[in-house]
Amino acid sequence: MKSPLFYLLVTCLVPAEVPPNQDPNHREVRRVAVYVESVKGGCLYPNAYVDVVHTVASPQKSASRIILKNISVRGFEAHTVDAKKGPGVLVTLEVDAKKSTILLDARDGTLTLILLPIPGTVNSR
């Protein structure tokens, strides 16, 4: 018999239904690896959809804003350590050319991912 922790890990890593990554507009996509400080809203998994929050901090104040919405996660490497920023997650996101430029411009602050509900579940949009 497997422990409850095993089922918790399997539930977090492999959801029952993962929506396929369909691109009806045949847009040109790019896969961009970004370092994120944290993931909010649950367990990250491949093919999840997230909103990307960019935070810029200064000695006087900090400001956060959502820079990208409904972005597909293609993969991730947990427990990554960046020499300048500390522990976090290296995440590969699938975006179009314009959105890849937005991600590259966000290197001056920190990134946080907000996990979106799985489509068709009770909490989905």
Image: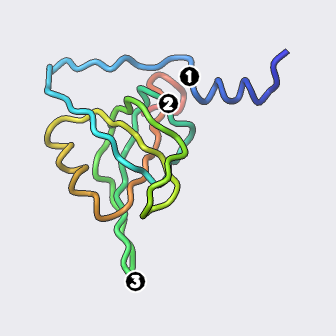
Q: Nearer the viewer, residue 66 or 120?
A: 66
Residue occupied by mark 2: 45
* Residue located at (45% from left, 27% from top): 46
Residue type highlighted by circle 2: Tyr
- To which quarter of the image does residue 99 belong? top left
- Residue at the disc numbered 3: 59
Q: Is residue 93 left or right of residue 90?
A: left
Lower position in the chain sequence, tag 1 or tag 2: 1
Residue lying farthest to the front in this orientation: 83
Q: Nearer the viewer, residue 66 or 124?
A: 66
Q: Are marks 3 and 1 in contact (CB under 8 Å)?
A: no
Q: Is residue 124 above or below residue 58?
A: above
Measured in 3D between alpha carbons, the distance from the residue under mark 3 to the one under mark 1, in whole angstroms, is: 41 Å
**Marks 2 and 3 in Cβ contact (< 8 Å):** no
**With respect to residue 37, does 3 lie above or below?**
above
Q: Nearer the viewer, mark 3 or mark 1?
A: 3
Residue drawn where x is 37% and y is 63% of the image: 55
Q: Residue sitting at 27 percent across and 57 percent down?
A: 106
In the rendered image, residue 23, in percent from the top left (x then y), is placed at 23, 20
Which element type, helix, strand or loop, lies under badge 3? loop
Q: Where 7 sits versus 67, above or below?
A: above
> Type of residue at label 1?
Pro
Task: Mark 3: give few (<14), some (14-19) or many (20+) Cα within 10 Å.
Answer: few
**In the shown orientation, is residue 108 left or right of residue 10?**
left
Is residue 22 found left or right of 15 in the rendered image? left
* Of the two numbered discs 1 and 2 in the rendering, the one whose residue sits closer to the viewer: 2
Residue receiving disc 1: 15
Q: Are marks 1 and 2 in contact (CB under 8 Å)?
A: yes
21 lies left or right of 26: right
Q: What amino acid is at disc 3?
A: Pro
Quadrant placement of the N terminus: top right
